[in-house]
Image (cartoon, rainbow, N blue to C red):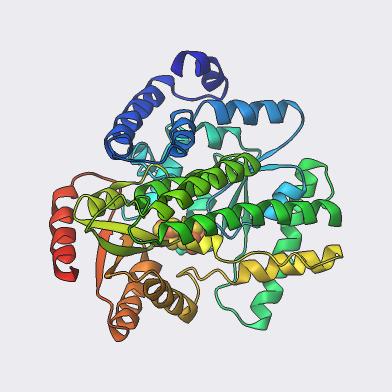
Amino acid sequence: MTASYEAMWERLGLDLEAHASLLEVLGKFYGDIYLSQQGRLRGMEYLDFVLSEIHGLRIRELEEAKAQGRKVIGTFCVFVPEEIVWAADAIQVGLCAGAEAGTEAAEKILPRNTCALIKSFVGFKLARLCPFTESCDMVVGETTCDGKKKAYEIFSDYAPVYVMEIPQMKRDSDRALWKAEVLRFKRAVEDLTGREVTAERLREAIRLINRRRRVLQRLNRLRAARPVPISGRDVLLINQVSFYDDPDRFTQKVDELCDELEEKVRRGEGVADGAARVLLSGCPMAVPNWKLPYIIESSGAVVVGEESCIGTRNTRDLVDEGGTTLDEMLDAVVDRYMKIDCACFTPNTERLEHIVDLARGLDVKGVIHYGLSFCQPYAMESFKVERALRDAGIPMLSIETDYSMEDVEQLKTRVEAFVEMIR
Ligand code: BJ8
């Protein structure tokens, strides 16, 4: 794809040489982790295609939309109410970055002991590696963890950042604060796009995003079958792509894939005979962070669920579609997002309950809790998660890592020992 997109990447100001190296590494990594799998669904060809065009076709689509006057809004967190963005005829893309490239540049303006996800998005910007970031007319930050909150102050020197205040508790006063923030965001998006968020447009946007959530719920139900019909890696990839693909097209393609999956389940065909079923829980895994799922699935286990923002946290709750006035619909949006159980909340008992319910519902042998190094909220919460799971009789392994490949062997040893134990 390189030759046909070079002019576009140059226009966006990318460092062409560094970008070409990134794509080369990504292609190799993808081949080893994804294309090497046996018995994949035909429907995964669409995902392979989207990935092979990750910085090509989708960016061209964004360029074309921008030429017609539409705006592109980038986000780092599932707290940003997507329905508002689409209702104002803008396009939302997830910008969380899951690769190490750019870390060196990031460490010049951020402390070294910052989580890899933050270093990655800052590094991608500084090293001029991400055409999504460069396509954005607005980049939405949020006051979730301290690392992100302070990083956006720095990031705003380089990109058009808008920050949403996210409550840290769930009392009535916090809901009121969140509603005020959603309304402030609505006005900011309307100012940017010049399009008013009307009841009719918001209704359509709510349905659009709910349809995407429903198809991912369907996928999650089907993957839980015995024998397991699709690898956890493939489902993670589908979730990752959901953040930047066109929502209508994505929903249709994943629905087709689910039809195929349903057939496979009916025929009783599996992809991981005898593998131990595990639930992965914790920090989000942004593209192309596939390290831990790959290690798990090459150590005698199969991932049957992701309790994370690039997983069930983003798809579990729908926005109520019963509202008739703009205000009722906005309230429904506010309420849906208040259900997010990110570790940035205190207390966060819902998350513990969700993990135990999910682990039981999926009938897993164990849970692997994943924390990015230097991520305080998830590291702190992992102790409570472990206790809740222990009380439920479910073993848990806690892993802390980053995007580097240095600890792969060490992680593999730990995961293999855990899998051996839960089997
Ligand atoms: S709603 S999980 S997407 S904040 S890993 S940057 S928490 S130090 S990503 Fe998240 Fe929204 Fe919560 Fe989800 Fe900070 Fe931890 Fe880094 Fe993190």
> Where residue 390 sits in the image (x, y, percent)?
28, 82
> Where residue 19 sits in the image (x, y, percent)?
41, 26
What's the residue at 63%, 44% (across, down)?
Answer: 247
- The mark tally for this picture is 0
Q: Residue furthest front?
A: 267
User: Which of the 4 quarters of the picture holds residue 108?
Assistant: top left
> Where residue 370 sits in the image (x, y, percent)?
32, 62
Q: Of 259 and 385, which appears nearest the observer?
A: 259
What's the residue at 36%, 62% (across, down)?
Answer: 375
Describe residue 61's horizontal placement relative to residue 77 as left or right.
right
265 w.r.t. 289: above or below: below
Describe residue 362's horizontal placement relative to residue 407 as left or right.
right
> Where residue 182 sits in the image (x, y, percent)?
71, 62
Q: Is residue 147 visible to us here?
A: no
Q: Is residue 99 visible to us here?
A: yes
Q: Residue furthest bottom?
A: 391
What's the residue at 46%, 19% (across, down)?
Answer: 1
Q: Where does the C terminus fall, quadrant-wise? A: bottom left
Q: Of 222 and 116, which appears nearest the observer?
A: 222
What's the residue at 35%, 32% (across, down)?
Answer: 26
12 w.r.t. 36: above or below: above
Q: Which of the four quarters of the rendered structure image does ligand 1 lie in? A: bottom left
